[in-house]
Structures are given as structure tokens and as C-alpha cells.
Amino acid sequence: MPKETLNPFEIAQKQIKTACDRLNADPAVYEILKNPMRVLEVSFPVKMDDGSIKSFTGYRSQHNNAVGPYKGGIRFHQNVTRDEVKALSTWMTFKCSVVGIPYGGGKGGITIDPKEYSQAELERISKAYAAAISPLIGEKVDIPAPDVNTNGQIMSWMIDSYEKIAGKSAPGVFTGKPLGFGGSLARTEATGYGVSLSAKKALEKIGKNINSATFAVQGFGNVGFYTAYYAHKNGAKIVAISNVDTAFYNENGIDMEKVIKEVEEKGFVTNNGYGKEIPHNELLELEVDVLAPCALENQITSENADRIKAKVIVEGANGPTTPEADEILFKKGIIVVPDILANSGGVAVSYFEWVQNLQNYYWEFDEVQQKEDALLSKAFEEVWALSEKYKTDLRNASYMKSIERIAKAMKLRGWY
């Protein structure tokens, strides 16, 4: 058996090629889409609290802007690499187009463990990075947002740095901002809300109501928490959740009201008597209606795909399932709602935030969620119809839908 593809950029390229082949697209379409249009690597010095100077490496990848400006997050993580941001920017292109948002994909990051630095140092690092990438970003050019280990405060620092260089107000150059600084209501909840909505739509396709479904949620950061939160609010039974340290399982259902209270008070969840502790890998293999991997990439591989018992998988994380695992799951009849569709609620509301910034007119919470619901529901139905037409899985269908839109724009531009 050939070695399993785990390099995220190689995975992204393979997914594009498969979808292009299924569509019988012009070979030029894959040739253009297989690589980002531009990848910037920057090195910048920052003064530490002790007066020493430390140099940092950062990246910004811009995949394709045929349908609109680049869009995508910035992550602070010690494992950030050039290939990772290239892959993530590629996925962002298709995530935007699958739901019909007029953006192309972008992604950035700094190779850094943020826990090793003080708040003051993180502010200086954030501002220096924003200054370093400032020639390539802008409200109508490339709009970054928070990602792993970044947040609204970091976006605020970056906007301040950018605006000083640009010499003008530009609130729409970064999204995911705090409410007091041009942010949108319902943005914090958006990704998890969308994952839960995707699960609800997929369950309906197999004749099951979410209010009688069981869920296992891997990862309990922002996405995992709100996935569980909205599934619970819709009547689902959450039987397993995990944090960085451990996973816990309760076949009778975890006390979600107690979990919600703990997260609201502490900002994280511990096993406060919610259920028995189980290994992380065991959570993935539980017999549940919905498995929501909301942690890191490459969690479901050819090694464990045969043991997956969930009826539906909704990907809250980016790239949690390898292409080899996808084939196994499809043959088993397990519905996989792919990351570019399931977790697109975040970029949908980022888009709404950007629109509100440009208009300088802001919407109410319920209005934002209604717009997100309408956008994601329409996209789900379009992808489901395409998957049935071509007798393929939802991941291929999602890429095919995106590629149809992007290819049309590239053709109209005369790129091929």
C-alpha cells in the first residue's frame, strides 16, 4: 500500500485534482489552482521585555483572487510552516466559493509558541508582523482574521499597526475584531453554529432528527464548544467531549448546562464529573450518530477509518480526514460533511463583518445568524444535489461546486 499522504499541501492538491477530473474541467483549471498565486515569507525583529532582540519568521499565502479579495486567518503556532499556510490558503479559496462568498483564499501565521511570551511582547510581535505583510493586504486586497492562538485583541493590534502605515482608517482590513472595535455580533459563535447546522442538515438526509441524535465532539476550543452548545440547544445528546489533556464519555449524556457554565466561568472545560475518562482515539471510534472532529488535522486516517462507527462526520477542524480515510468512509456509507462546507460559518460571518465595516452599518445578532443559516443551508443543498448527480462524496462535491464557480470567473477574466 502506498504511503498515506499527510502533508497538508499535498492533500489539498490531491483534492483539487480529483474534483477537476470528476468535472472533466479544462486542464488549465488545475494548473492554475494547484499552487497559490503568491506566498510571502517575512523575518522581523522584535524587542523582548528584557531588552534583547529576537527575530521571528512569518508567512502570508494568497491562493487565488479570481472571485474577490483574499481572505483567511493568521495563526500563532510553533508548527507553522510554509506548506501549512499554502494548504490552508488553498482550502480557504474553496471554502469561500462553496458557499458563494466573493473571496479567494489566504492564510498566514508566525512560527511561535505564544505561551512563551508576555502580553506586551505579543503586542509588539503582532504589530511587527502586520507591518511586515502590510504591502500585500488591504480592505479590497487581502483580509486576514483570527485563527489558532489568535483573537480579537491581536486583530486590534494589527489594525492599529496597519492604519499607521496606511495613514487612514481601515476597519475592514481585518475581521474577527472585538465588538467595541468594528466586530460583528454572532462572529464568536459562527463556526460552531455552522458545524451544528451542517450536522442537522446531514441527519435530515438520513431521516433522523437532531433532537434524538447522539454527538461526540473532539476538541473543545471555540469551534468544538459552540458545535456542542448548539447541538445541545437543538435537543441532541452530547455523550463525549475532549480537551487537550483528556476525553470523557457518558453514554447517558454529558450535563451540558454544567459544561456551559464551567466554560463561561473558566474559559475551558475539565472533567468535572461529566463522565469516565477515555483515550483520545477512543472518542473517534464511539458508536454515535454524529462525530465532530474539531481539533487538528489528520485525525481520521486509513489506520482508524475502519473502526469509525458514526453515521455522520462533520469536520469542525481543517483537514481532520485524509484522502485515504475518505475512500474507506464513503464505502462504509458514512456521510462526511467536509471542512470547507461544515466549518464555513466562520468565514461567512467574517464576510458579514467586512460588509458591515464597509457600510459602517451594523446588524443585530439574530439577523446575522439568519443570514448565516440561509447561506449555509443553500450551499449544503447544492452540494448534496451535486454529490447525488455524480455519485460522489460530499468532499468531492464541495470542491466541484467551488471549482465550477472559480473556473467560470477565471475564464471570464481570460486566465485560460
Image (spheres, rainbow, N blue to C red):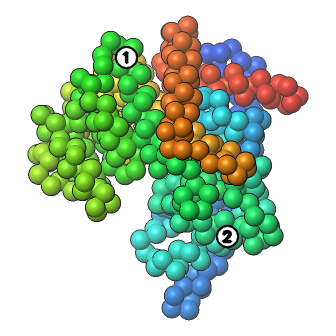
- Spot occupied by residue 163 in the image (x, y as percentages of width and height): 74, 68
Binning the other alpha carbons within 10 Å of mark 2 as few (below 14), some (14 to 19) or many (20 upward) gives some
**x and y, in percent, of residue 134 in the image:** 74, 63
Instruction: Determine whether 235 is above or below 266 in the image.
Output: above
Image height of 127 relative to 406, above or below: below
Q: How far apart are the alpha carbons under marks 1 and 2?
A: 46 Å
Name the quarter where the C terminus is drawn: top right
> Would you say residue 78 is visible in this rendering?
yes
Instruction: Point out residue 80 in the picture as x, y percentages from the top left corner.
Output: 53, 58
Q: Residue 322 is drawn in which quadrant?
A: top left
Q: Is residue 350 left or right of residue 26?
A: left
Specify the label residue 160 is tagged with. 2
Q: Earlier in the sequence, mark 1 or mark 2?
A: 2
Q: Residue at x 46, y 69 (%)?
A: 114
Residue located at (65% from left, 29% from top): 100
Q: Position of residue 52 (x, y in %)?
A: 56, 89
Front residue (pair 108, 126): 126
Asked if 38 appears above or below 109 in the picture, the reply is: above
* Residue type for callout 2: Asp
Q: Secondary structure at mark 1?
A: helix
Q: Which mark is residue 100?
A: none
Label 1 sits on residue: 204
Do callouts 1 and 2 mark residues in contact (Cβ within 8 Å)? no
- Residue 12 in view of the camera: no
Farthest residue, direction right = 414
Instruction: Assign a secondary structure to mark 2.
Output: helix
User: Is 61 left, or right, of 117 in this rendering?
Assistant: right
Q: Residue at x 58, y 55 (%)?
A: 183
> The N terminus is located in which quarter?
top left
Amino acid marked by disc 1? Glu
